[in-house]
Image: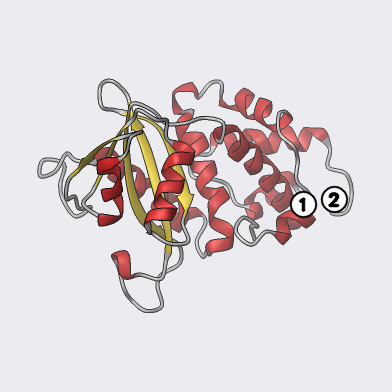
Amino acid sequence: MHGTKVPVRYWFLAAHLIANDKRGISALRLSKELDCHYRTAWTMLHKIRKAMTDRDSKYFLSNTVEVDETYVGAPSENGKRGRGTDKIPVVVSLSLDSKGAPAYVKMRVADKLDRPTISGIIESGISHGAVIRTDALKVYNYLDTSEHYTHESRASSLQVTEKENEYLKWMHVIISNVKHMINGTLPGLDRKHIQRYLDEYCYRFNRRKFRGQIFNRLLVACVSTITITRRQLRGYTTEACA
């Protein structure tokens, strides 16, 4: 089917598979499910992922929002961990509902974990008036004097049990889950691949309470966005996917 127009029924099946697989689906698996060329499946997946990205970009997080940074991708060649690693830095923002349970999440690949980058990510995804909770990383200190946000800061670690540390608890759970997805289903991703996969995870997470509707919602997102060509996808430096 490579080089020919994709039948409409294939798009419906691809959207169904993406919407209902919590682990994420690879282009190789989709090509087998549709019995089509890998390049065709690859292009279909990233057209649909773009629709997910565009849909979630319309919404801002509000109320209480946890913000933390993590590192994802292939194992580091230098063997370092944490903030000294050569993995891909990602800023994660998670809003909480009135009961303190996770509501919505956003994830952004960052070139650096410095103040201009962090502040840009926060301003582009979190509504003014929100309470922002962070760990004690100094880059967040500017929020202490922000006119737009209330800042809560406390030292926190991923290496603690729930009883030892409730602070940023749900953030740590979500970070663990997205790393499991990437390492288990999509291993070997580098910087130019990662953002759309994170967007796919967030899209699915943000609609987890609407499991019976997610397929229909994804179809609406697909027909409501401007499509992208394979040539454009391959030309991206931060978003093209292999």
Is residue 114 left or right of 27 when viewed as pictured?
left
> On residue 1, which mark appears?
2
Residue 184: x %, y % from top left: 45, 55
Element class at badge 1? helix
Location of residue 205 (image quadrant): top left
Q: Residue at x 37, y 46 (%)?
A: 177
Tell me which label, 1 or 2, sits earlier in the chain.
2
**Residue 176 makes an appearance in the image:** no
Q: Where is mark 1, residue-wise?
A: 40
Coloured how?
A: secondary structure
Residue 210: x %, y % from top left: 49, 22
Q: Residue at x 78, y 33 (%)?
A: 9
**Residue 231 makes an appearance in the image:** yes
Residue 4 against residue 211 in the figure, above or below: below
Is residue 107 left or right of 29 when viewed as pictured?
left
Q: How many marks?
A: 2
Considering every residue shown, the one lying at the far bottom of the view is: 78
Residue 156: x %, y % from top left: 19, 50
Is residue 87 left or right of 156 when viewed as pictured?
right
In the image shown, does 147 or 61 lie closer to the viewer?
147
Q: Residue at x 35, y 70 (%)?
A: 85
Task: Decide: few, some or many residues near mark 1? Use Cα within 10 Å; few <14, some 14-19, many ≥20.
Answer: many
- Say which quadrant the C terminus sits in: bottom right
In the image shown, does 121 or 162 lie closer to the viewer?
121
Residue 148 against residue 119 in the figure, above or below: above
The residues bearing labels 1 and 2 have C-alpha atoms spaced at a distance of: 8 Å
Residue type, label 1: Thr
Q: Are marks 1 and 2 in contact (CB under 8 Å)?
A: yes
> On residue 239, which mark appears?
none
Considering every residue shown, the one lying at the far left of the view is: 164
Residue type, label 2: Met
Location of residue 126 (image quadrant): top left
